[in-house]
């Protein structure tokens, strides 16, 4: 069989054409393999990103749950303690104290202005008159307001911690 092939002589242009065709085929196969490798690299990159995204989502969910549990309980405790303090006002501010201490209308105007965020206006002669508000009621209102402020402070601290932990997770 080899003897048959040796008697067959190809012209030079045909031989060169075969060489070019073979080289082109090898080059095309190399490009296909390169594209396959690049495609696999892309798939690996997307898979790694998906795994990181899932890990971040799990970590964020854990932070959300932990923060919710931690601060919900704290705030509930703050309000419970505040209620106890409000209920104890009559122990510390008696009816005799209410009778001896006069809350004037100016104090009430000033107090209401402070909580509304608007100025009370100019002083009036009626500001010196009794407002009819017992001292115990002022103490209860103050205890309630203090409780609300402490609870809001705890919420703000919780949100700050939550934000910092979320930032740390995504870095």
Image (cartoon, helix red, strand yellow):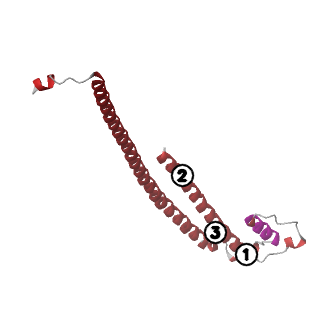
Choose between 58 and 156: the one closer to the eye: 58
Q: Which of marks 2 and 1 is nearer the N terminus?
A: 1
Choose between 133 and 69: the one closer to the eye: 69
| Residue interval drawn in magenta | 105-115
Please report the residue visible at 14 percent of the width from the left and 25 percent of the height from the top: 5
Mark 2 = which residue? 163
Q: Quadrant of residue 153?
A: bottom right
Q: In this view, does 121 lie to the left or right of 33?
A: right
Q: How far apart are marks 2 and 1 (CA)?
A: 44 Å
In this rendering, the label closer to the viewer, 2 or 1: 2
- Label 1 sits on a secondary structure element that is loop
In this rendering, the label closer to the viewer, 3 or 1: 3
Q: How far apart are marks 2 and 3 (CA)?
A: 29 Å
In this rendering, the label closer to the viewer, 2 or 3: 2
Q: Does residue 67 belong to the magenta stretch?
A: no
Res 144 label: 3
Residue 33: where, in percent of width, then height? Answer: 32, 37
Q: Do the residues labelled 2 and 1 touch (CB within 8 Å)?
A: no
Q: Earlier in the sequence, mark 2 or mark 3?
A: 3
Vertical position of residue 91 compared to residue 73: above or below: below
Mark 1 = which residue? 134
Please report the residue visible at 28 percent of the width from the left and 26 percent of the height from the top: 14
Residue 164: where, in percent of width, then height? Answer: 53, 49
Magenta stretch: dominant secondary structure: helix
Residue 75: where, in percent of width, then height? Answer: 54, 63
Q: Is residue 146 left or right of residue 41?
A: right
**Disc 1: CA contacts within 10 A as few (<14), some (14-19) or many (>=20):** some
- Label 2 sits on a secondary structure element that is helix
């Amino acid at each position: 069989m080899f003897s048959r092939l040796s008697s067959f002589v190809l012209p030079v242009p045909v031989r060169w054409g075969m060489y070019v065709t073979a080289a082109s085929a090898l080059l095309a196969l190399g490009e296909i393999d390169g594209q396959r490798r690049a495609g696999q690299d892309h798939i690996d990159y997307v898979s790694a990103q998906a795994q990181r995204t899932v890990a971040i989502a799990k970590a964020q969910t854990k932070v959300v749950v932990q923060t919710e549990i931690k601060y919900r309980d704290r705030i509930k405790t703050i309000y419970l303690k505040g209620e106890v303090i409000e209920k104890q006002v009559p122990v510390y501010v008696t009816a005799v104290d209410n009778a001896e201490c006069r809350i004037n209308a100016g104090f009430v105007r000033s107090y209401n202005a402070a909580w509304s965020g608007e100025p009370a206006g100019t002083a009036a002669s009626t500001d010196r008159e009794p407002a009819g508000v017992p001292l115990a009621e002022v103490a209860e209102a103050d205890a309630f307001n203090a409780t609300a402020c402490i609870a809001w402070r705890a919420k703000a601290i919780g949100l700050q911690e939550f934000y910092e932990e979320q930032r740390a997770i995504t870095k």
